[in-house]
Image (tube, rainbow, N blue to C red):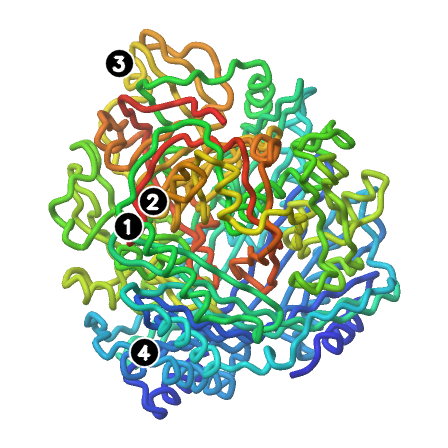
Amino acid sequence: MREACAAAVDAALGAGAGYADARAVLRRSQSVATKNGRVETLSDAETEGIGVRVLVGGAWGFACDRRLTPEGARDAALRAHGFAAAAGGDSARALAPTEARFGSYRTSVERDPFSIPLDEKVALCLRAEEALRHPDVKVAEAAVRAQSERKLFLSSDGAEVEQELVECGGLIEAIAVGDGLVQVRAYPSIHVGSSAQAGWEYVESLGLEGEAPRVAEQAAALLRAEECPAKVTTVVIDAEQMQLQVHESVGHPTELDRVYGTEAAYAGTSFLSPADLGSLRYGSEHMNITADSTTPGGLGSFGFDDEGVPASREAIVEDGVLRGFLTSRETATQLGHGHGGSMRADGWARMPLVRMTNLHLEPGSGTLEELISEVDDGIYLETNRSWSIDDKRLNFQFGTQMAWEIENGKLGRLYRDATYTGVTPVFWGSLDRVARPEEWVMYGLTNCGKGQPGQHAHVSHGASPARFRNVQVGVRS
Amino acid sequence: MTGALEIAERALEHASDEAEVYVGSERSGFARYAASAVHQPTLIDDTSVHLRVVRGQRAAVATTNRTDDAGLAELARRAAEMVASASEDPDVVPVAPPAEHPEVRAYDAETASLGPADQARLAAEAISAVDGLELYGYVTSAACDSAMVSTAGLRARQQTTDATCLALAAGEGASGYAMRTSWRAGELDPAAVAREAAERAERTRGAVEVGPGRYRAVLEPYALSELLYYFSFDGLNGLALLEERSYFAGRVGERAFDPQLTLVDDALSERSLPRSFDFEGTPKQRVPLIEQGVIRGPVWDRGTAARAGRASTGHGLPAESRSFGAMPTNLELAPGDAESTEELAERVGDGIYVTRLHYLSVVNPREAVITGMTRDGTFRIRDGRVAEPLVNLRFTVAVPDVLGDVLGLTRETVLVNQSDFYDERWAYGNRVPALATADFNVTGVGGGPGL
């Protein structure tokens, strides 16, 4: 891999590039899923190749090749150079300085998820899914996944880093059907469940089998629940939904490439501007958001990003005020602040983009029960079901799987089909309490989309339950 | 480049079980631009080999992009190891049988020959067509080669090309969108796409808010295609029908939509992004989904069709995504008689005009409730004419409501690319007209147009 990367960088510089970097990547992914007692998915995918990025007279170029050989690497470098030269560019492009680094990083793993026999994984899914069975549950599903990625990054700025990232995760999901209603209940998250950069011990810690009966009971109970009423009220939101709230309404708008418009055509821009740094009130004084690519177990953890910038922990929002953006070396230079560190690529065949790493809502004080006990009339919302936000990341609407009325400080009746909507800074401005560190939970999602061609990022978010006042719930079609 | 079929056949030779192999090769270029400069040019050259093995009632899938003999042997070893761990499934889908695949014209040599210099030139044509605003988006083109073989005797290959120009013309407080796609790059006029986006953007300055409520509306093809795409996840998916998640559940044969609505999936049409067979090797066919407002049924892959006692309609997804069910990828909504979107605005009288939708999410699959935002060209319609620009609007609609009282459809249709080119390249899209509806539920407001 090193020989290939070096050949790519040498070839690009030899062709006249002012800067070049190369990433050789070997990725292996494994998925096991069972549904209603049968194996639904049993797949194992490997892919390898090299991606070469060059800067030629202020124009970027990127090309890739699946041959991990000096010949393939050189070909990719020359194609990237040719594309950059043909595209032409902005001669003012500059990269924030970074120290030349030699380094390595490896996920801390107790049990390599690929060393776990497949039949053990299948058996776990079948047991967990068996425990989801319930007369009202039409579809019971369990899944586990694992991924390993070995990569070597080498740049003309002198960086040479080798990393091995290992992650795994899982979920269970019950779909209850009755009387024309369809209700879903998943654990620990919907979509692709929750993953962590860790060994198989993470999947075991999820306790999928043990959680299944509760999940099934709740799915069934939703069929008999009343529809969530429409009103403006106080909401208490669990850690799982909060992590997506952070992702969508803080993570994406603080990606500096969006602020500068380079995602305008697809993922969108941001309501933030560079001048907002240090002054914009994003939310109440209870709002503290940290970007931390050093978080143990975070899917966005690494030793170095895909520009060779070392991992770091940075404040994004402090006491409700915007203190930082997620940056690349290029956007940090444009801003005149920061040093990059958030550039990540989806495998070897995509160009790095500014992405979230691990973005957390820092905990406050008090228990979930205390947050609820201080509410006379409100709704407690749990676990995401639907999600949507506008291109500037202002107007959002989320649906949750579960909702309970809060009456005089206690949970009351269960509601189905709960939604809530708001406008980002107004919503975060209404944050009046975040629960304590002991209630802080980190979730990892693997389906964050961005870029053209599209790229998936794997990111983690930690959060404690939080309370917001004057929120519109119960949006109707 | 070694052909996909040759690679597939070599991979099959390494398999010791009943097996099927799908090979997909991509050679593509993306000239992605922002602020009127190409900023993320990406060249991709990759080949993936998917080997599915079936041993008795067990099945497993392994994938690699190493196509030398050592790589294919390792692929077979991994697949064999996995299938040994699978549990028995009485409903296991056998390996793909031989089939007669329709001849489909989907490959254009001129498009296949486009290189990075051409993609950069086409991007420059788009960029230089716009004055006073900046252009964001991309020009892309690709040549793809896919093949499928099986130990049961299936042998199929298709070569396809695709090209897309996407343009967002934007400035302070203004943005407009346009896009064209085709399997023949020569049919694209990047400058015209950019001008369409810019013309629309110029009309979005000074956007104002409207209150929540139910509006009559015109949906441009871009917006309508996106809405149908999200509806299809559950609504048109055979698996969702079996699992009673689909709006179609219990309603097949009912008139649930306006009689003007006829929706098919037709990958054989040259006016689509055509394909000859799906990822299971099943021949593509024209599938009626809604006829004159009457629900005819969803699309099926081999697994869901077997469970339903039907035949696959040729809508199997890549093996790794098959748990999602079956997906229509070439929707075609029959046109109407309106000569233009202006005529649709006349029929609306008082309402809103929507160019493009953003970040949709299915709120309630059974009732086909979808939420999302409008963007890059939202206007008020007053007195039958497109009037002042509006800020981005949140909508929360039941699709059957939107399609239940149709005020008209344009005669002209537009092919809208719905693939965002994640993972392996696979261009797909919908051909739809613009549509006027009597019911579009606005539930909030977002930011204004522009950057």
* Residue highlighted by disc 4: A59
Horizontal and vertical percent for residue A88?
Answer: 33, 81
Marks 3 and 1 close (CB-CB < 8 Å): no
* Residue highlighted by disc 1: B205
> What's the residue at 49%, 33% (across, down)?
B216
The number of callouts visible is: 4
* Discs 3/1, front: 1
Horizontal and vertical percent for residue B300?
Answer: 75, 46
Marks 4 and 1 close (CB-CB < 8 Å): no
**First in residue order: circle 4 vs circle 3:** 4
The quadrant in which residue A329 appears is bottom left
Horizontal and vertical percent for residue A196?
Answer: 44, 47
Q: CA distance from mark 3 to mark 1?
A: 46 Å
Instruction: Tell me the amino acid under the disc marked 4.
Output: Ala
> What's the residue at 29%, 24% (across, down)?
A467
Q: Nearer the viewer, residue B183 or B345?
A: B345
> What's the residue at 70%, 47% (across, down)?
B326
Q: CA distance from mark 3 to mark 2?
A: 44 Å
Horizontally, is B89 left or right of B237 in the view? right
* Residue highlighted by disc 3: A374
Horizontally, is B39 left or right of B161 in the view? left
Instruction: Tell me the amino acid under the disc marked 3.
Output: Glu
* Discs 4/1, front: 1
> Can marks 2 and 4 be said to lie on one chain?
no
**First in residue order: circle 2 vs circle 1:** 1
